[in-house]
Amino acid sequence: MDRIDTICDPLTTRQDNNRTRPGLAARATLAARRARETDPDTFEHRHTDWPQWTRRATMAHAIATALNVPIDTVTVTDDPDRRYGLVGQYPGHLITITDPDTAHRWQFIPDPAAHDHGWLFLDECPGCGGTNVPIARVATLADLGDYLDLDNDERFDHLPAEFNGDPGHRANCLHSPLTDLTT
Ligand SMILES: [Zn+2]
C-alpha cells in the first residue's frame, strides 16, 4: 500500500500484531471528514479563532479521558440553546459523544464549577419531557452510570442546580426559566 492510497482512503487498514486498525493518516482523514459533516461552518473557519478551536480540543480530550471513549467520537459545537455573558453574547459549548457501537448520541455541557473536570449530562426532564436538560453532574464514568442505572432508585435524588431554569424545559414545566411577568 503506498502512502497516497493510505492518505486518500480513510478505510485503509493495516495488520499489526494480528490486530487490524487504521493508520494515523486514515484516522486523521476520517476525523477531518467527520468534522466537516458535524459542524462544517466552525471547521472551515477554525483558523479565524484558533484559541477557541484549541479550547474545544482540550475539552474533548478531557471528557474522552474521563469517560474512556475514543477521542474521535467526541465533538464540541456551539450550544444552540444556552448562551452566557451579561446579555447572552457568548454561546455555550455542547459536547456530543457518538457511541461507536450503538450510534447513540450522548450530550453534555461543561459544568461551570468544574473547569474542564466535570460535565452536566443532558437528558429528558421527568416532569415535562423536554429533551436535553442538565440532569446529572458527571466527573467520572461511574457518575454517568449511577444516573443511567434504571435499578438505581436514587438516580433523581441529586439533580444539579442547573436543572432548574434550563431552556431545555417546555414552557409549562415547573422547572422552566422564569418569565418576567412585569413586561
Ligand atoms: Zn421540565
Image (tube, helix red, strand yellow):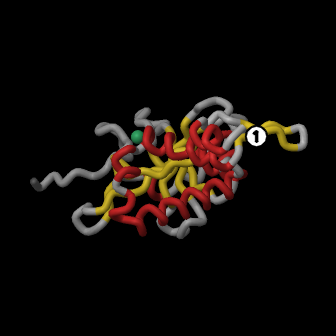
Residue 128, placed above or below residue 112: above
Crowd class of label 1 (few under 14; some 14 to 19; many from 20; radius 10 Å): some
Q: Position of residue 41 (x, y in %)?
A: 34, 47
Q: Quadrant of the N terminus?
A: top right
Residue for point 48% across, 60% down: 56
Which residue position is annotated with label 1? 21
Residue 120 place in picture, x, y as percent: 53, 54
Q: Position of residue 124 (x, y in %)?
A: 48, 37
Q: Can you tell me which quadrant of the image ligand 1 is in?
A: top left
Residue lying furthest right: 17
Query: From where the camera sits, is residue 144 visible?
Result: yes
Q: Residue 85 or 31: which is nearer the viewer?
A: 31
Kindly state the secondary structure of the residue where label 1 is placed.
strand
In the image, 16: left or right of 159? right
Q: Nearer the viewer, residue 78 or 106?
A: 78
Instruction: Tell me: 35 left or right of 140.
Output: left
Position above or below: 107 against 54: above
Farthest residue to the top: give it.
102
Number of marks drawn: 1
Residue 59 falls left or right of residue 15: left
Q: Is residue 99 in sight in this rendering? A: no
Residue drawn 61% across the image and 42% down it: 4
Front residue of 72 and 92: 72
The amino acid pointed to by label 1 is Arg
In the figure, residue 17 lies in which quadrant? top right
In this rendering, is residue 98 above or below 49? above
Q: Is residue 105 above or below residue 71?
A: above
Give how far across and how far down residue 162 sits, in percent.
Answer: 44, 56
The image quarter containing residue 130 is top left
Q: Residue at x 40, y 51 (%)?
A: 43
